[in-house]
Amino acid sequence: MTVRDAKVEDVEQINRIHNQAIHEKFKVAYLTPWTEDRCFEWFQGHDSKAYPVYVAETDDRVIGFVSVDPYRPGRAALKQAAEISYFIDRDYRRRGTGKKLIEYMESKCEMLGIKTLFAIIIDTNEASIKLIKKCGYQKWGHLPRIAVFDTMEAGHLYYGKRIII
């Protein structure tokens, strides 16, 4: 497995992996799958020099991706904090792909000017919670019952880690 900068040609595979999480419910707060155009728009909004997207690849197949997004854009005092998101193809979960992607992103933080990373996780997503804790993130907050999936409610957990001291 290798990790590399995501390319436009990867958008179809990134979208496929992202939509797996949407279909599984309680993994992300989106309720309807993204179109490829929507994913392309999301991808275009990620400047590789500030908020990159990286993919994990095996045998020329994208098996996961990680990205960072600004926290509360426009608020200069928060510029060095970013939200990390990661998605793994369901056929490649529990094989170290997520951990490798998170660690890779962390290794780029100094170059990106990011001192703090945090993940916002649906509180029923036990696999993601286990992974982020394994990577040394600590629980910083909980917003209970703010996500509604049909008739079921779930909360958002905030896990954070200071990358550059």
Image: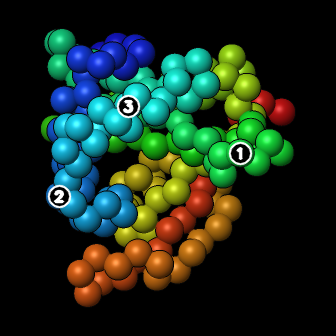
Specify which label sits upstream in the sequence, 1 or 3.
3
Q: Residues within 10 Å of mark 1 (few under 14, many from 20)?
A: few
Q: In which quarter of the image is residue 1?
A: top left
Q: Quick one: label 3 or label 2, which is nearer the N terminus?
A: 2
Q: Provide the residue designation for mark 1.
A: 74
Distance of mark 1 from mark 3, alpha carbons?
20 Å
Q: Nearer the viewer, residue 85 or 7?
A: 7
Image quarter of residue 29:
bottom left
Q: Quadrant of the C terminus?
A: top right
How much space separates mark 3 and mark 2, taking CA atoms?
20 Å
Residue type beneath disc 1: Gly
Q: Which of marks 3 and 2 is in front?
A: 3
Picture coordinates of residue 111 (x, y %)? 69, 17
State the image coordinates of residue 125 (x, y, percent, origin top left).
37, 62
Residue assigned mark 3? 43
Q: What residue type is labelled 2?
A: His
Residue 23, label in figure: 2
